[in-house]
Each structure stands twice: as structure tokens, then as C-alpha cells.
Image (cartoon, grey):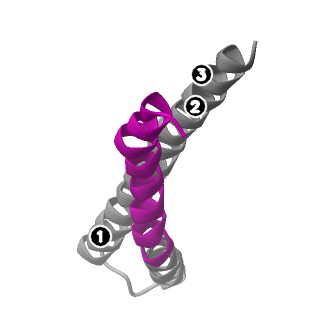
């Protein structure tokens, strides 16, 4: 492995892998919290004794988890793109060297 491939590996591939892994690590618990929050809001919405304040609080909690899931999902995708760019750079660099 030459120095250019090593530099790409250290500066692009590993940070991309770390970003994807870290975002995915935080995405799964947030997804579970979103499901629980949605079920709670749905149950409260079907309850005839629910007040507007309770519904508003439950909806805000659901939206908070929904936004967090979106942000973590974007982190997974962005890390994957960075990872793919690094791998593509290593492959392109090694294929031009072989020609």
C-alpha cells in the first residue's frame, strides 16, 4: 500500500466509517423511542378524556424523536457517502497505477 492510499484510508475512509457507525448506534435507540412515543400519542388521541394540553405534549415528544431520527439518518447517509468517496479514491488511485 502506497502513501496516497494510506492517506485516503486514514483521512477519509476511517472517519466515514466512524460517522456511519456512530450515527447508526444512536439511530436505533431513537427509533425505538419514536415508536413508543407514537404509540403513546395514538393511545392518548383515542382516549376521550385526553385534554388538548396532553395531546400537545405527546405530539411534541413524538416530533422531537422524529426529528432526531431524521438527523441521525442523515448522519448515517453522510458518513456512507464519505466512506464511499474514500474507497472510490483508493480504487481509482490503484487502477491508474496498474495501467
The mark that comes first in sequence, 2 or 1, is: 1
According to the picture, the residue beneath numbered tag 2 turns out to be 90
Indicate which disc residue 93 carries.
3
Helix, strand or loop: magenta stretch = helix
Mark 3 and mark 2 in contact (Cβ < 8 Å)?
yes
According to the picture, the residue beneath numbered tag 1 turns out to be 52
Mark 1 and mark 2 in contact (Cβ < 8 Å)?
no
The answer to whether 87 appears left or right of 15 in the picture is right
- Circle 1 residues within 10 Å: few <14, some 14–19, many ≥20: few
- Image coordinates of residue 4 in percent, x first then y, are 44, 28
Magenta region includes residue 11:
yes
Which residue range is magenta in the image?
A: 1-30
Look at the numbered disc 3 and give the secondary structure of its residue: helix
Whether residue 81 is visible here, answered yes or no, is yes
The answer to whether 52 appears left or right of 9 in the picture is left
Quadrant position of the N terminus in the picture = top right
Magenta region includes residue 47:
no
Amino acid at each position: 500500500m502506497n502513501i496516497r492510499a494510506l492517506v485516503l484510508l486514514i483521512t477519509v475512509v476511517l472517519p466515514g466509517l466512524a460517522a456511519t457507525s456512530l450515527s447508526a448506534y444512536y439511530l436505533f435507540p431513537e427509533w425505538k423511542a419514536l415508536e413508543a412515543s407514537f404509540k403513546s400519542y395514538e393511545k392518548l388521541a383515542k382516549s376521550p378524556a385526553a385534554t388538548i394540553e396532553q395531546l400537545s405534549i405527546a405530539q411534541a415528544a413524538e416530533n422531537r424523536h422524529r426529528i432526531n431520527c431524521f438527523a441521525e439518518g442523515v448522519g448515517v447517509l453522510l458518513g456512507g457517502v464519505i466512506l464511499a468517496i474514500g474507497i472510490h479514491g483508493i480504487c481509482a488511485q490503484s487502477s491508474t497505477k496498474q495501467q
